[in-house]
C-alpha cells in the first residue's frame, strides 16, 4: 500500500494489523497526515479482522457494529474539526493540546502555566469562540518555544523582559508581542484570582511601579482620501465577484465602519424601518449594558442590500448570503476569514487599476469612515480620535447619545461621495 502524504493536515482511521492484542483483536488508530509526516494515536477501539471488514460493508446490519462505526466516525470528525480549527497554525503538538489535553486537564499541575493555557483554550472552544482560541494557541506555541516548561512563580518581570527581547531579536512585531502577552496576562489573572499566586508575585503593571508593562505598537492608522473613496464608488467592476467585493467594502464604509463578521451576521430582523440595529460581536461578551448600534439606511446602503441581499426577506434570513444558520461556529469562522481575504484581494486589484497606492483592506474601510467624518467637521463626541480596537467601547457609548435625525445627517455626508 502506498504512503499518503498531504500538505494540508488530514485525519483518518487505521486498522493496525501489525499489533495483535491478547484477545486476538487489532487496535484502531487515529492517523494525522501533514507535510510528508504522519503520527498515529491510540484510540479506545479494537476489532477482529472479520469485524473490520464487516464494518466497512455497505450492507452492515449488526447493531453493535453500527454503534461502533458511529462512535469511530465521531472521533474522526472531532479530529478533522480540530485540524480545521488550527488552520495555518497546525502542528502535531498543538493538535495534541486541543484534541487530548482537555481530557486530562483534571490532572494538570496547578503551578503549570501551559496546563492552564490548555484548559482555557478548551473553555474558549466550548464557548465557540474560535478566533480567540486560535489566538491563545499562537501565544502558547510562542511561549513554549521560548521556555519549554513554565510555572507561575517563574513568570517574573525579568522573564517577561527576556521574552520580549527574544521576540524582537527574532523579528516579531510589537503588536504580536502585545497580543501574546495579553493572553498570558489573562491566564495569570485567573491564577491570581484562584490564589495560585499572590498580589506581590503578580508581574504586570506600570514600569514606574517596577512591574512589566506590555508594549503597545504606535500604529499610524491610514485612511483613504475622499477622492480615492469617490473613485471606488464610481468604479465599474469587471466581474460580478469584483462588484460584490467592492459593494461589501462600501457597505462597511457607509455603516459606521462595521466589520465584516458583523456584516455577514446581519439578518433582516436587524432592520427596523430605516435603521439597522445590531450588537458588535467583538464587544458583546465584555459589556454588561448591551445597547445596539443604530445605523441609518442611506440610499447607497439600501442599493447594496437590494443588489446583493437575500431575495427572501424573512426575519431569520441573513441579509448577505455568506454564512447561514446551518453552519457550525468553525464553519462560520473559516468562511468569514476566507471571504475577507477574497474581498481584500479584489480591492487590491481595484486600487491598482484606479491608481490608489494606499492599502484598501476591509480594516481601511472602517478607519476611513471615522476619518471622513472628522474631516467633515463631525464632533469627536460622535467618533473619537482614538477610533480603533482599544477605544470601541467609548465610541459606542458616545453613539448612543445622538438622535435619529443627527444620524441621518451623518449618513448624508457619506452619501455625497457617491455623487462626487
Image: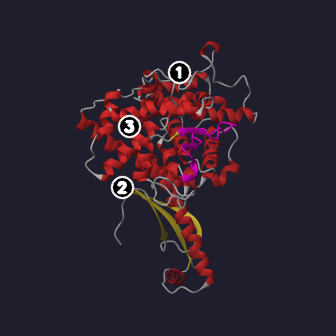
Q: Which circle, 3 or 1, is nearer the viewer?
A: 1
Q: Which residue is mark 2?
A: 7
Residue 73: image x %, image y %?
54, 70
Q: Sequence-wise, which precedes: disc 2 or disc 1?
A: 2
Q: Which circle, 2 or 1, is nearer the viewer?
A: 1
Side of 64 where 6 appears, left or right = left
Residue 209: image x %, image y %?
65, 14
- SS of the residue under disc 1: loop
- Which image quadrant for residue 100? bottom right
Side of 231 where 107 appears, left or right = right
Q: Which residue is mark 3?
A: 361
Gap between marks 2 and 1, in whole Å? 52 Å
Q: Which circle, 3 or 2, is nearer the viewer?
A: 3
Tell me the crowding category of disc 2: few under 14, some 14 to 19, or many 20 or more residues within 10 angstroms, Cα based. few
* Magenta-span inclusion, residue 264: no
Q: Tell me which residue sits at (28%, 46%) in the image.
A: 237
Q: Tell me which residue sits at (36%, 46%) in the image.
A: 245
Residue 30: image x %, image y %?
51, 64
- Which image quadrant for residue 274? top right
Q: Name the one closer to the observer, 223 or 334.
A: 223
Q: Which residues are magenta?
A: 268-295
Q: Which residue is mark 1?
A: 379
Q: Sequence-wise, which precedes: disc 3 or disc 2?
A: 2
Does residue 94 appear in this view?
A: yes
Side of 346 where 208 appears, left or right = right
- SS of the residue under disc 3: loop
Q: Which mark is residue 77?
A: none
- SS of the residue under disc 2: loop
Q: Residue furthest right?
A: 195
Amino acid at each position: 500500500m502506498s504512503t499518503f502524504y498531504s500538505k494540508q493536515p488530514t485525519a483518518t482511521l487505521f486498522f493496525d494489523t501489525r499489533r495483535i492484542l491478547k484477545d486476538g483483536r487489532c487496535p484502531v488508530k487515529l492517523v494525522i497526515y501533514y507535510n510528508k509526516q504522519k503520527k498515529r494515536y491510540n484510540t479506545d477501539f479494537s476489532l477482529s479482522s472479520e469485524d473490520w471488514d464487516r464494518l466497512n460493508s455497505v450492507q452492515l446490519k449488526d447493531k453493535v457494529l453500527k454503534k461502533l462505526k458511529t462512535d469511530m466516525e465521531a472521533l474522526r470528525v472531532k479530529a478533522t474539526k480540530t485540524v480545521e480549527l488550527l488552520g495555518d497554525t497546525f502542528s502535531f503538538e498543538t493538535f495534541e493540546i486541543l484534541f487530548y489535553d482537555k481530557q486530562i486537564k483534571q490532572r494538570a499541575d496547578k503551578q503549570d502555566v501551559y496546563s492552564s493555557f490548555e484548559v482555557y483554550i478548551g473553555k474558549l472552544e466550548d464557548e465557540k469562540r474560535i478566533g480567540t482560541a486560535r489566538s491563545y494557541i499562537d501565544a502558547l506555541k510562542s511561549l513554549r518555544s521560548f521556555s519549554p516548561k513554565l510555572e507561575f512563580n517563574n513568570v517574573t518581570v525579568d522573564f517577561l523582559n527576556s521574552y520580549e527581547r527574544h521576540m524582537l531579536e527574532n523579528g516579531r512585531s510589537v503588536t504580536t508581542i502585545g497580543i501574546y502577552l495579553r493572553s498570558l496576562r489573562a491566564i495569570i489573572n485567573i491564577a491570581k484570582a484562584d490564589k495560585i499566586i499572590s498580589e506581590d508575585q503578580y508581574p504586570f503593571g506600570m514600569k514606574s511601579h517596577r512591574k512589566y508593562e506590555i508594549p503597545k505598537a504606535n500604529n499610524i492608522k491610514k485612511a483613504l482620501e475622499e477622492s480615492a473613496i469617490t473613485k471606488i464608488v464610481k468604479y465599474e467592476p469587471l466581474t460580478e465577484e469584483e462588484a460584490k467585493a467592492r459593494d461589501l467594502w462600501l457597505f462597511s464604509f457607509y455603516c459606521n465602519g462595521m466589520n465584516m463578521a458583523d456584516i455577514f451576521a446581519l439578518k433582516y430582523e436587524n432592520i427596523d424601518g430605516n435603521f439597522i440595529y445590531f450588537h458588535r460581536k467583538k464587544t458583546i461578551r465584555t459589556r454588561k449594558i448591551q445597547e445596539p448600534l443604530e445605523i441609518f439606511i442611506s440610499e447607497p446602503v439600501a442599493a447594496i442590500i437590494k443588489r446583493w441581499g437575500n431575495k427572501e426577506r424573512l426575519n431569520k434570513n441573513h441579509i448577505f448570503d455568506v454564512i447561514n444558520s446551518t453552519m457550525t461556529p468553525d464553519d462560520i469562522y473559516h468562511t468569514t476569514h476566507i471571504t475577507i481575504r477574497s474581498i481584500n484581494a479584489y480591492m487590491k486589484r481595484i486600487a491598482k487599476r484606479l491608481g490608489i497606492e494606499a492599502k484598501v483592506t476591509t480594516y481601511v474601510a472602517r478607519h476611513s469612515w471615522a476619518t471622513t467624518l472628522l474631516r467633515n467637521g463631525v464632533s469627536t463626541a460622535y467618533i473619537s480620535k482614538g477610533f480603533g480596537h482599544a477605544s470601541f467601547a467609548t465610541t459606542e457609548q458616545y453613539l448612543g447619545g445622538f438622535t435619529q435625525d443627527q444620524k441621518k445627517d451623518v449618513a448624508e455626508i457619506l452619501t455625497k461621495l457617491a455623487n462626487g
